[in-house]
Amino acid sequence: HELRSPLHGIMGLSSSMAEGATTPAQKRHLTMIKGCAARLLDLVTNIMEMAKSDKIDSGAEAICKRHVNMMDIVDEVVSMTQSAVDKNGHSLLGSEVSLENDMPTGELPAVVGDPYKITQLLYNLVTNAAKFTSSGTIRISAREDYEKGMLEIDVADTGKGISQEAIARIFDP
């Protein structure tokens, strides 16, 4: 309760402030605050539920599955990354780095999944690219693979890349 109440307050206040925002940028930033607080509230709620039901010991994890609009998630991740700062308060994106939303303009198929986990995954990929790209471009794009019935999201950057040794073990537990 002590963790959830402030998050509800942040969500309510940012929502009401967004309604009275005088510029589109203010409204977008306040909406992002509400979205971040909602994801944090979801995380806190999941942790509390897992602790109650002893799921932590069994390794089970609750996953929310619903239709997800990837265009909205990419827009949110781009906005969050453009506003993100490191622990010293410096912009995460270097002044010589361009973050490009290269998503197709047409309709993309809805993805079924946990919108909070998808957002977190994409945000982690983009901010990781930002940390290792001192100049150039970070590009987020998507394409539908009709044969596999999948939507592929790509995060490509002009950073220094991953060493061959790291690539060999990147997906090892």
Image (cartoon, rainbow, N blue to C red):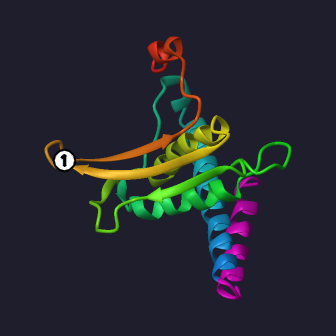
Quarter residue 26 falls in:
bottom right
Q: Tag 1, which secondary structure?
A: loop
**Residue 120 percent across, percent down from the top left:** 54, 46
User: Looking at the image, can residue 139 be seen?
Assistant: yes
Q: Is residue 141 left or right of residue 25?
A: left
Quarter residue 76 falls in:
bottom right
Instruction: Examine the structure image and report whether residue 18 is included in the region drawn in magenta.
Output: yes
**Which residue is found at the position 62% from the left and 71% from the top?**
31
**Which residue is found at the position 47% from the left and 36% from the top?**
61
- Image position of 54 with respect to 43: above or below: above
Q: Magenta region: which residues?
A: 1-23
| Pick the front one: 10 or 58 | 10
User: Looking at the image, can residue 173 be seen?
Assistant: no
**Residue 146 percent across, percent down from the top left:** 16, 49
Residue corresponding to mark 1: 149
Q: Main secondary structure of the magenta part?
A: helix
Residue type marked 1: Gly
- Image position of 72 with respect to 120: above or below: below
Q: How many marks?
A: 1
Question: In the rendered view of the protein, which quadrant contains the N terminus?
Answer: bottom right
Instruction: Examine the structure image and report whether residue 37 is included in the region drawn in magenta.
Output: no
**Residue 90 percent across, percent down from the top left:** 81, 49
Q: Is residue 90 left or right of residue 8?
A: right
Task: Assess disc 1: are there few (<14), some (14-19) or many (≥20) residues with their C-alpha within 10 Å of its C-alpha.
Answer: few
**Which residue is found at the position 63% from the left and 42% from the top?**
130
Q: Is residue 62 left or right of residue 40?
A: left
| Pick the front one: 152 or 35 | 152
**Which residue is found at the position 65% from the left and 86% from the top?**
19
